[in-house]
Amino acid sequence: MSTTVQPPPAPGKRINRIGLEPIAYRGSKTTLCAGCGHNAITERIIDAFFELGVEPTQVIKLSGIGCSSKSPAYFLNSAHGFNSVHGRMPSVSTGAVVANRKMIAIGISGDGDTGAIGIGQFVHLMRRNLPMIYVIEDNGCYGLTKGQFSPTADLGSKLKTGVINDLPPIDTCALAIELGASFVARSFSGDPKQLKAILKAAISHRGTCMIDVLSPCVTFNDHEGSTKSYSYAKDHEEPLSDVSFVPFFEDINVEYDPGTTTAVTLHNGSKLLLSKLAEDYNPTDKVNALRLLHESSGRDEFATGILYVEPDKPDFLDLLGIVDEPLAFLDESRTRPSRAVLDEVMESFR
Amino acid sequence: MPATGVVPQEADTRTSGKRIVNDFAIQVATVNGSGSQTANLVLLRSIFQMGVPVSGKNMFPSNIAGLPTWYTIRASAAGYIGRKKEVDFLVAMNPETAREDVLTLPPGAAAVYDEPLKLSELRSDVVFYPVPFDKLIGGVTHDAKLRRLVRNMIYDGVLSRLLAVDMGQMEKALRKQMGKKEKAIALNMAALAAGYEYAEANLPKQDPFVVEPMDKTNGMILIEGNAAAALGCMMAGVTFVAWYPITPSSSLCESLIDYLKKYRREPETGKATYAVIQAEDEIAALGMVIGAGWMGARSMTSTAGPGLSLMAEFTGLGYYAEVPAVVFDVQRVGPSTGLPTRTAQQDILSAAVLSHGDTQHPLLLPASVAECYSMAMEAFDLAEQLQTPVFVMSDLDLGMNTWMAHPFEYPSTPLNRGKRLTADTLSRIGQFGRYRDVEGDGIPYRTVPGDGLPPYFARGSGHNEMALYSERADDYANNLDRLARKFNTARTLVPKPEIETAGPGGIGFIAYGTTHWAIVEARDQLRAERGIETSYLRLRAYPFTSDVGAFIDRCDRVYIVEQNRDGQMLSLLKMECTVAQFAKLRSIRHYAGLPIDGRSVTTELLKQEGS
């Protein structure tokens, strides 16, 4: 009798709660520029899905067009992906999520893909509170077409060619909060701890999770004077609170002192812990969140962290009243009405 | 539904004082928003209930209230349901258009008019029937709002008397139209009676037109094409609908919503086995449909010309990433906003090659409400079989007007979900490559998220047969060639044309969609009036099946008849035919916004034939 014994995991080898190694969450090799903030975001996405033990085949990855939109190819190789058309990831995601409500959808967009060509679809996605994670890899410029300004470029910032941006930026977070997204956050690609915690919380939230991640473009927008540069972001990031996330399958760590920590319970029982820093920030207060965004942008700072969360808001699938099973997998017996139904309709036209 | 070869004899009978039975067109000219639709449908339905073949065509403005609208009801013992060019019996209710409406009548026609309009002095060769509508309605109700609503029912009463439309049928039709609103029915019945009694006492019959009972509509239904298409979609098992309102397609999705709400909720839970989303625009509508199609849902949208233009980019993505989608295009008059409430076949060429790059899309071409229903089901099957967007090219005339039909058949075949990979197929073919042509028909196997089978990365950028990003020349060319092979396979899967051959040699017609009804009538006119036998091929789909070339080969000359300025189907034919076939092709085009009629086809054909 031949025996094949599974070797025990090598010492130090990381396995998550569903028995997968980090490699199962990786994708193809990135083709973005070395040092691109987007690659750091990709790494945090891999970490977050791995650490939460999400089955990668239960995820769908979507994107529009641009440098950012190439990213879904660089994580979760065993998930289906759809790199669609410029600015239209929201509509493709809407169809996909409604067609199969069992999948976890993550969409990667850019500041041009979202703020310019895709702003129309973006605002309607936020309105619908469609359950998905919507990441903007925000570098304030069009990288793939060589550095033109995007709608999130700072007022007065300067292109390499000397052109000055004279239009105010769109704050995608303020827009998302105003329009009805139930989870809105901002982070920085160079802040792995915070970004990972936000992503993990987003995976556990049900509703639209809009995460604007400042992600310097090392080729076109990492120069002095750009607020999307590494140096500016590091100096002017104003973390709201220390974001920690406790999945539903873990006990809450005692290290958080209840006196300085706010806990937000997400729909699946996970807890979002915000230990307060400078001020008493309540992420469930919409008006407070909008005031904070206006005030910090007035100081040329960007507040990072979970800006707004509404854990119990009904999502778009609740509003549609659809069956629990994926629409895409319904059998003909449930989707083609009987002969009696056709006869009844025909009778009404006699 | 080819009609019999009975010859209309308008010219002879009008002057000789003979009766013209069940062969005339009534036109009601009103102001839109005046509630005339109920009166018109009651009249149409009454004639239909008397067993006489009818058709109704609404010519309405792109407006909510206050602009001219005309409704034409044609009774035809011979069964012609296309538009009749001449109006025989006018009901002139609109002061704005009344003079012109009367002046364009053919000699021998009749006109009921609102007495204060004083139209009778305009013509001496038309029979006039003045009716004091305001005075008569005063005897029915004193409520100003109700008077406005039921005023039009008076002309139904007048016509009932003048044309011998049975009052019992009028009441039955009214009840059908109004449902259980007893108070409204009573009020409308009073208006009907007032019109009838006035005509009986004051309007001696002077025109030749009468309706007599027949048995040609037994068991049939009256339905609009958009409702028929919606039914077809429900029976096709649609699970995802995204749409944006646009005339003349809105009633397709609105009917569908009504049907789905009623018949596609789970009895135990009340939950829906479908989702309908009103999108922010047509771009998003097709984007959602593509997203849902990628996931494996049967998904669709419906639109009209301007929406089709907006859908171009996503159509290209659907073609290249190979995602099933069904798009109904209920065509209206372009270019640009054009005439939103007038009919045309003007989107054929743009739909066939919609989007940049080399793209080709299957089109289905329904001619009847029955085909709106059956082709809806075929479209979903084809979209999944071919893994590509499929367009159903209806038009305003078909979609929004009321047509007679035999009750629709329950589908006899199960849904065809196309080449979905299974574990068994995977073990047979070895490795899964999303865009690998395993069987040589250009159609690859596909998987969908959540099915437990190998994933792939869909994209509109260059890719190889493993669905990996590729800019290699050979990968690109191989993929494009396979897509062309797939389109050739489509030729063998789409509905075949209907062919009636008179030849060998001689004149042939090629037509499609609602143009069919004018061809039926024109062929009868040519046979009866000129002794000319013609062959006819009715296209039911694009790409063309092999029957089309063979048909052209058999004829000496082939007239492609269509409702657009540029001969759009002619252009598609020319792209594929041989030099010898090319030389035989001629073109008859109708593009004034009104449905094409048989007489115009006959006249134009004779002109081009030089006879």
Image (spheres, coloured by chain):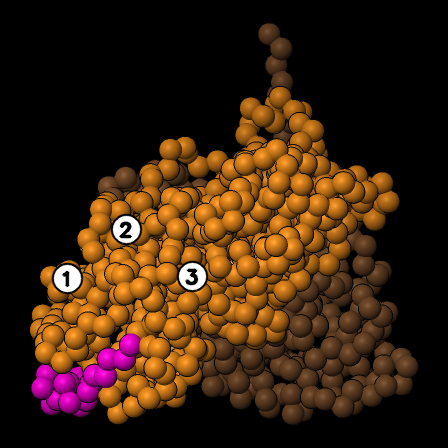
Chain colours: A brown, B orange
Left/right of residue B524 with respect to residue B311 in the rendered view: left
Say if the magenta span includes residue B135: yes
| Mark 2 Cα-neighbour bin, 10 Å: few <14, some 14–19, many ≥20 | many
Left/right of residue B369 with respect to residue B301 in the rendered view: left
**x 38%, y 73%: residue:** B107
- Residue B16 point in image, percent of width and height: 31, 64
Examine the image and state in which quarter residue A108 appears.
bottom right
**x 72%, y 42%: residue:** B581
Chain under callout 1: B
Residues shaded magenta: B127-148
Q: Which mark is residue B221?
A: 2
At label 3, which amino acid type do we have? Answer: Arg
Residue A74 visible in the shown view:
no
Is residue A12 positioned above or below A88 on the image?
above
Front: mark 2 or 1: 1
The residue at the far top in this view is: A1
Quarter of the image for the N terminus of chain B: give it: top left
| Mark 1 Cα-neighbour bin, 10 Å: few <14, some 14–19, many ≥20 | some
Q: Distance of mark 3 from mark 2, alpha carbons?
A: 19 Å
Label 1 vs 3, first from the N-terminus: 3
Q: Which residue is mark 3?
A: B83
| Secondary structure state at the residue bearing disc 1 | loop
At label 2, which amino acid type do we have? Answer: Ile
| Secondary structure state at the residue bearing disc 2 | strand
Q: Distance of mark 1 from mark 3, alpha carbons?
A: 24 Å
Label 2 vs 1, first from the N-terminus: 1
Front: mark 3 or 2: 3
The answer to which of B20 and A191 lies nearer the viewer is: B20
| Secondary structure state at the residue bearing disc 3 | loop
